[in-house]
Amino acid sequence: MEQRYIKYLTFTFTFIFTFNQFTYLGSIIDTSWRSEPGICRRVAIVKSAMQKTYKSMWRAHSTLSTTLRLYNICILPVVLYASECCAPTKADLARLDALDQWCLRHILGTNWWDHIGNIEVQARTDQPAISDGSAEQKW
């Protein structure tokens, strides 16, 4: 990602550049202090990880409880990383819920033509939605 500077300051013969946006410890820090760029980045990371490990981890011959434990340990921390820094908007929560549903459907092996609702997916996996009140301790 290209990082462009707004301006620079001079401090004891040293140039200090200021940026619109930068990545720090995996999170995108933006001058607007919105959480959207960081969430979009984490969504891309999670989708890439889920697709790259599809056959070896998610569709392997393991039980659903083992796969969900892996999901809770490996994927959800990436999704929720630094989520306490900014208050998420309704759009952010909807984006995270959509990612959560995509991941859980991926784990269950369901297709779009199966016509299985979100509530049914949550019931099958016994996972609360990210925006649910029961998942608030993660925020």
Image (tube, grey):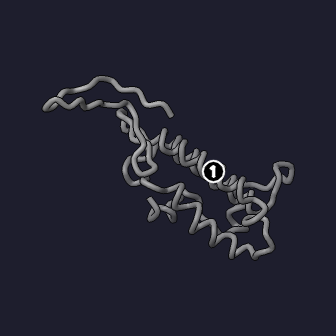
Q: Residue at x 42, y 43 (%)?
A: 23
Task: Say whether residue 102 is left or right of residue 135.
Answer: right
Q: Secondary structure at mark 1?
A: helix
Asked whether 33 or 18 is in front, the reply is: 18
Which residue extends farthest left?
12
Q: Residue at x 30, y 30 (%)?
A: 18
Asked whether 47 or 132 is in front, the reply is: 47
Q: Residue at x 48, y 39 (%)?
A: 36
Task: Say whether residue 108 is left or right of residue 28.
Answer: right
Q: Residue at x 80, y 60 (%)?
A: 109
Which residue extends farthest top?
7
For disc 1, the marked residue is: 99
Give the image location of residue 90, x and y in percent. 50, 43
- Give the answer, above or below, for where 79 lies relative to 71: above
Asked whether 4 or 21 is in front, the reply is: 4
Kind of residue at badge 1: Leu
Which of the 4 quarters of the picture holds residue 84? Answer: bottom left
Asked whether 119 or 2 is in front, the reply is: 2
Task: Say whether residue 69 is left or right of residue 35.
Answer: right
Which of the 4 quarters of the picture holds residue 139? Answer: bottom left
